[in-house]
Image (tube, helix red, strand yellow):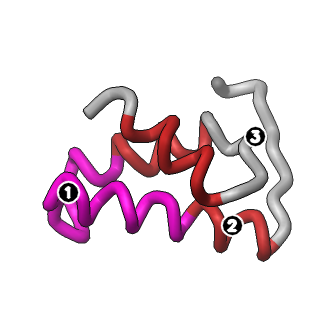
Amino acid sequence: MAGQHKVFTPEHLNIVRRAIERERCQRRLPRKGAQTERLARKALDQAGHPMVEPLARALGHDA
């Protein structure tokens, strides 16, 4: 992962943030903590999805 660079627009980051928040709430995870950080890392890795719904579904696959 060290050699990977991704550029996100503010709109794209907002989509990622909303998907993380939706999944975090469904799993009843705390706002901060190791589980939430893992979810955020996975979201950024999966961030090729341009919309909240597909990204949220992708995040839900490891629940």
Q: Which comes before the other along the chain, label 3 or label 2?
A: 2
Question: Dot 1 corresponds to which residue?
Answer: 33
Q: Residues within 10 Å of mark 1 (few under 14, many from 20)?
A: few
Under tag 2, what secondary structure? Answer: helix
Start and end of the magenta stretch?
Answer: 17-37
Between 2 and 49, the one lying in front of the other is: 49
Between 51 and 45, the one lying in front of the other is: 51
Q: Quadrant of the C terminus?
A: top left
Which mark is on residue 13? 2
Question: Dot 3 corresponds to which residue?
Answer: 48
Q: At which x and y percent is residue 3?
A: 77, 25
Q: Is residue 50 above or below residue 10?
A: above
Q: Quadrant of the N terminus?
A: top right
Q: Residues within 10 Å of mark 3 (few under 14, many from 20)?
A: some
Kindly identify the amino acid type of the residue bearing the numbered disc 1.
Gly
For the residues labelled 3 and 2, the Cα–Cα distance comes to 11 Å
Please identify, in this view, whether the residue under mark 1 or under mark 3 is nearer the observer.
3
Residue at 20%, 57% (x, y): give it: 33
Q: At which x and y percent is residue 40?
A: 44, 50
Residue at 35%, 55% (x, y): give it: 23
Q: Is residue 39 above or below residue 14?
A: above
For the residues labelled 1 and 2, the Cα–Cα distance comes to 20 Å
Under tag 3, what secondary structure? Answer: loop
Q: At which x and y percent is residue 44?
A: 60, 45
Please identify, in this view, whether the residue under mark 1 or under mark 2 is nearer the observer.
2
Kindly identify the amino acid type of the residue bearing the numbered disc 3.
Gly
